[in-house]
Amino acid sequence: MSQRGRLLLFLPSAAVLLFLLIDGLQRLTGFGHYPGPYGFVLNGVGVNQRHATNLVTAVNFDYRAFDTLGEEFILFTATTAIVLILRHMRGERERPSGDELRRENASEALRGMALAFVAALIVLGGYVVTHGALTPGGGFQGGVVLGCAAFLVFLAGEVVAMKRVAPEKLLEFADAAGAAGFALLGIGGLVFAGVFFQNFLDLGKPGSLNSAGTMPLVSISIGIEVAGAFLLVWTEFLDQAVLVRSGGGGSE
Amino acid sequence: MTTVQHLAPLAVVIPLLAACVIAGLSFLPRRLHEVVAIGAAIASTTLCAILLAHANDGPIVYWLGHWEPHHGVALGISLTVDQLGAGIATLTGVLVIASLVYSTRYYDEIDGPYFALVMTFMAGMVAFSLTGDLFDMFVFFELMSVAAFALTAVMIEERGPIQGAINFAVTNSVAGFGLLVGIALLYGRTGALNLAQIGLSLDHHPADALVAVALLLVVAAFLTKAAAVPFHFWLADAHAVAPAPVSILFSGVMVELGVFGAARVLSTAFAQPIEPSLHDLRMVLVGVGVVTAVVAAFSCFQQRHLKRLLAFSTISHMGIVICGVALLADRALAGAASYALGHGLAKGALFLGTGTLLHRCGAIDEFQLRGQGRDLPLLGLVFVVGALVLASAPLATTFFGKSLVEDAALSADYAWLPAVLALCSALTGAAVLRASARIFLGWGDDPQETRTESEERSQEASSREEGADVKPHTATPALLVAVPAVLMLAAVLAGLVPELVPSIERAAAHFRDHASYAGAVLSGRAPHFPPVAGAHVSATAWIYAAASTAGALLLASFGLRDRQVLPVTVADVLRAAHSGHVGDYIAWWTFGMALLGGFVLWAVAG
Amino acid sequence: MTFLPYAVAAWLFVVGLYGIVTSRHLVHLAVCLTVVQSSTYLILLSTGYVRHGSAPIYADIPPVATAVDPVVQALTLTDIVVESTITALLLALAVQAMKRFGSVDPTFLRQLRG
Amino acid sequence: MNEVFQAIAMVSMGIVGTAVVLARDPLRQALILGVYGMTMIVTFFALQAPDVALSAIVVTSVGLPPMVLLALRKLREYRREHEE
């Protein structure tokens, strides 16, 4: 279809779709009037049942942990897929790591600044991961921050040197181990408490760091997975942008 | 809780853990990855089969995390394993095992992550069929989507897979977001995510525009996965370029799961609201199924790229399965399930057979392969039997399935439906028969001088280029013929097991009994199902089956003489619609939403 | 006000689709897809919002306070992860498309037709 | 007061979201996407969803930008290499 034909098909249809969406949405109870019951029931019983003060985390890591398991494996699958899709093709070579590469790297000043950030980011990321059950945040958010810290080390140093710090295999292992850890916590519930994903550790005192039973462990394993996954994806893209060059042929 | 219940989450987690082992230890040799993957697939399939055997007295309900409902409000997620769900999960497992075994010999080189992707794909499909929670369905819908996008693009050295994966990913993601909006609408109305609870909560209100739009968004998302026209464009692209062991999973069970998802929400969450408008909604949905079956059957017949031909035949057969679900009757649903079983096994065998031809000859074009299959007689037999199964020849599983659909169509006053479906069976069967005669027997005219149309020529060019990257092999490993042969044998034998079709009829009736379902899920009541009277295959069903088989033979000989069944202009329009441009596909998707939405709004909210 | 968030979300859904349909660049297309998805965040969070409710985090508020629905927030979190993975995957495919086709304009991706 | 704040946040989300779609140059689009992320984060805070806002922050300002920018850079490099 030509761009014109496409729009001729799309625009009237989109208008109808917009009308349908609005027609459906306007029959909701109206903004600010959530009728319940699901969320209200959890708000009523959640803190007592789970000793977690952040109920969003309690939903994600306990009540609806199976959803989160699926979500983490979506991330895991996409990461594995990106490694597979961006693998070096026939006829591609890595750019030699000499002068040419050095040109790509950050300046000395930027390098120093980045390293100063790293320590702060590690503290922040670690805090967000471990306090998931108490305050906003959790494994995913903290994991990205931790991954970012490591990535800054990469950017500040040599692209090649960073591969020595965290080789691809190690990142793949972290990604898989984090995901597997979460799945194993589910099996732990089955083994120690009798039902898959049942919270099998002591719930502790609400508000304290080791409260909410298995939730901090879930958070940590997700944190490991997410940090590994994001780092892996970033380095794959960085590889493509900086190192990989097609050898001649190209687009046929 | 009984021990059997605990198997449900394990059937999902085992392949997930296998994926972690494979991807985390990617330095291990390929054979070890294969062993882990096949072992996990067998274990999970066995669990699904055990669940299937134990679900005959009603759904097995498993509250994950021990979150049982609190005064009728589901706090957590339930796995609700009924026989149709466990059955399609078992079919998934069988096809995954076949695919993995086949790929041990098929790929010359393949990276470990490939097997990890197959494992998460499997876990996504199994969880999707076992879960009883709407949002959980979305999550695992996305998990199997993401794995499928990646598996489409495995062969990054070629051009087709990249384009196919992009079209697949964009179309299905948009559909997934639509599903999410539908979920949000239902949640805003009912405050529930559990299918049974949504169903109970919707019982209290008459259906309005909100329910209609939610139904549109949810069902259309699943129909996009099931490749209903006009949401179907991605399928031909993705199936044609994915490697054979992946195509078998796509055609054999992934698209069927789309229809399954639609059937699931229609018979749980929406069962009560659509009750008053059953007649109108049936008309709309049967319309979707018929258009899908007919359009794709003609597209299928005019293909010469073998995998694309099979892909279009899958779309057409999905149209038939959609008709079965769309009739909104127990017997029709049983027909759809039996049909999906027969089709999944047979189409899986055909896709693997095509892979074997590609492996041997380095080509996938029907004319290029002319006479090349002479030294693979067993594979030829597989193709011919497969063509007959697709044509719903008497005694095939597809035949029993279709006769049930026809039966239900007659009692719902759709007397014309069987004839239309028979035409589609004949066309799709004929396409495969024609290709097998040309490839394995060398029959038919030499096409070179007769083809002049420009669209044809470009198609020829692209289908020639397809095989360019695959090195032909001088010998075919026995396994590459044995796996498709075993699958085809299973497809044929399944039709001959006397107890199979009646038990599917029972399962379908239980599946649609939404009051028993809700009772079992929310209050743990053991369901009391009324006895189901098995249907007898009527005389007209035999006549239609004989007609479609004869029609397939006739059309195949017609096609061998290089004749088209459609006028050139119509054929070119059909081809031109499949432009390969993702923007076109989304424009068509929006068009389909608008059209279907208008009809659903009219039917449900009136 | 009672309908504003839904109107904005419906608009974003459709306008994102418009971007995908007319896109001439795969990276642009991937970003438009995130706009479609962001409409779902808005719908989800708005359905669970309670007027004058506070965040469902009981570290800061008394246990009896009215709080908004935590479930939709959990769902949105899942949704955000799904979005970022699909975007990343499409970007990787765009890079490969450039290598194979020499272009990232969908108009010039012409391998699969008919 | 809170309602006014919410309304402003949502309307700006709608406007900036439209701008993201209409920006045809990918690099410019990436910049506007950053602004869009901000409006989204503000909206999430206004809807009492700090967890979601935190996720949006890490995704739109830490997670995705390196991928988009590196992919764009790769595309540019590739084009340059093949035009030489």
Image (cartoon, rainbow, N blue to C red):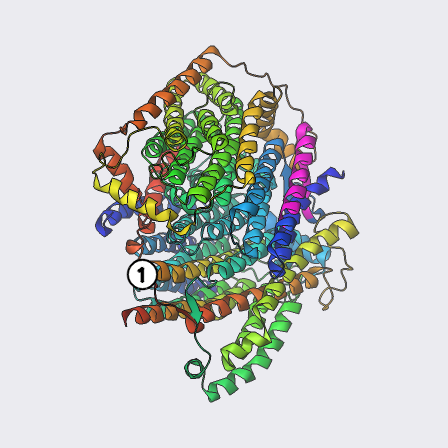
Front residue (pair B207, B259): B259
- Position of A233 relative to B551 (above/below): below
For mark 1, what is the residue?
Answer: C103
- Position of A229 relative to B571 (above/below): below
Asked whether residue B88 is drawn in magenta, I would say no
Dominant SS type (magenta): helix
Give residue B257's position: percent from left, percent from top. 51, 38
Q: Secondary structure at mark 1?
A: loop
Q: Quadrant of residue B190?
A: top right
Q: Residue furthest top?
A: B539
User: Which amino acid lies under the numbered mark 1 shown in the image of this protein?
Assistant: Ser
Highlighted magenta segment, given as a residue range: B37-64
Give residue B10's position: percent from left, percent from top. 68, 45
- Position of A217 relative to B529 (above/below): below
Front residue (pair B124, B239): B239
Which chain hosts label 1? Answer: C
Q: Residue at x 55, y 16 (%)?
A: B535
- Left or right side of A2 for A146: right
**Is disc 1 surrounded by few (<14), some (14 to 19) or many (20+) residues within 10 Å?**
many
Q: Residue at x 76, y 38 (%)?
A: B2
Quarter holding the C terminus of chain B?
top left
Count of labels in the image: 1
Asked whether residue B50 is drawn in magenta, I would say yes
Would residue B136 be visible to someone looking at this image? no
Quarter holding the N terminus of chain B?
top right
- Left or right side of B11 for B466: left
Q: Quadrant of residue D69?
A: bottom left
- Position of D74 relative to A81 (above/below): below
